[in-house]
């Protein structure tokens, strides 16, 4: 008589916040940010027609915003507090990696005017902490939304990011009709951050 064995599928590893995962994920995130910035600079210099230029820049901002907000949570498999914290840590390390690329590569090439340095009296250190906080914040919010989606179903990148992108488009459209004259890429970036934070707050309120 043949013995039978019942096997139970092991759950997928989740809530990864170990040092290696955070460092590797943050490094990849910094490189993604660098690629997005280089693409934005290329479009701003090579595409001279105003409407196509603004449209492409806006798409890059939207794609980059979604990437830096939601990729960390995907890599950390954020389902609970630990995974959300891991995603936020990746966001922080990603800003440090991009900062190194910015200083070593973009500054010597004079890729763009250093207006923020002038505001700070020739120093970059006053705004770098803001950059670190922003990168940490959006990855943290992305982790919250990813964990919230996972409680309701499959938390794929598209499923988590799509509501934020739709909300951003709606918010930017309303802002345009309301008379906000900021450049479309800047307006999109602000709209994305607001939509991300608002939907994360809704997710937390729903859980409470």
Image: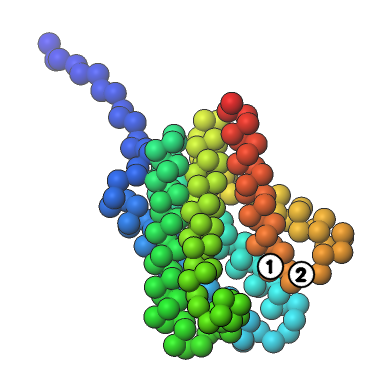
User: To which quarter of the image does residue 94 belong?
Assistant: bottom left
Residue at 59% across, 26% down: 208
Describe residue 67's horizontal placement relative to residue 169 as left or right.
left
Compared with 159, 177 (above or below) is below
Does residue 129 lie above or below 170 as drawn?
A: below
Q: Residue 53: horizontal and vertical position, in percent?
A: 69, 78
| Residue sitting farthest toward the front | 121
Pinpoint residue 127: horizontal percent, then vertical percent: 53, 68
Res. 138 mark: none
Q: How crowded is mark 2: few (under 14 residues within 10 Å), some or many (20 or more)?
A: few
What colouring method underlies this structural image? Answer: rainbow
Q: Quadrant of the N terminus?
A: top left
Residue 109 left/right relative to 114? left
Residue found at x 25% / y 23%: 7
The reply to whether the C-beta atoms of the residues labelled 2 and 1 are less than 8 Å apart is: yes
Give the number of marks: 2
From the viewer's side, name the closer residue of 120 and 50: 120
User: Considering only vertical position in the picture, is 105 above or below 62?
Assistant: below
The residue carrying pointer 1 sits among few (fewer than 14), some (14 to 19) or many (20 or more) residues within 10 Å by Cα, namely: few
x and y percent of residue 128 in the render? 49, 67
In the image, which disc is placed on residue 186? Answer: 1
* Viewer-closest of 163 and 177: 177
Which of the labelled discs sits on residue 182, or is there none? 2
What is the secondary structure assignment of the residue under circle 1? helix
């Amino acid at each position: 008589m043949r013995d039978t064995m019942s096997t139970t599928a092991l759950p997928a590893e989740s809530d990864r916040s170990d040092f290696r995962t955070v460092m590797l994920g943050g490094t990849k995130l910094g490189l993604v940010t660098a690629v997005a910035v280089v693409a934005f600079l290329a479009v701003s210099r090579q595409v001279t027609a105003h409407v196509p230029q603004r449209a492409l820049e806006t798409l890059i901002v939207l794609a980059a915003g979604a990437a830096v907000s939601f990729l960390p949570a995907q890599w950390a498999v954020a389902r609970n507090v630990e995974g959300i914290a891991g995603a936020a840590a990746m966001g922080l390390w990603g800003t440090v990696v991009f900062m190194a690329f910015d200083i070593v590569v973009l500054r010597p090439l004079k890729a763009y005017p250093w207006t923020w340095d002038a505001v700070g009296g020739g120093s970059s250190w006053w705004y770098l902490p803001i950059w670190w906080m922003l990168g940490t914040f959006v990855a943290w919010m992305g982790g919250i939304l990813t964990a919230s989606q996972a409680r309701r179903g499959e938390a794929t990148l598209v499923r988590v990011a799509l509501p934020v992108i739709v909300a951003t488009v709606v918010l930017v459209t309303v802002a345009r009709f309301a008379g906000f004259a900021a450049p479309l890429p800047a307006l999109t970036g602000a709209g994305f951050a607001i939509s991300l934070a608002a939907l994360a707050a809704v997710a937390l309120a729903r859980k409470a």
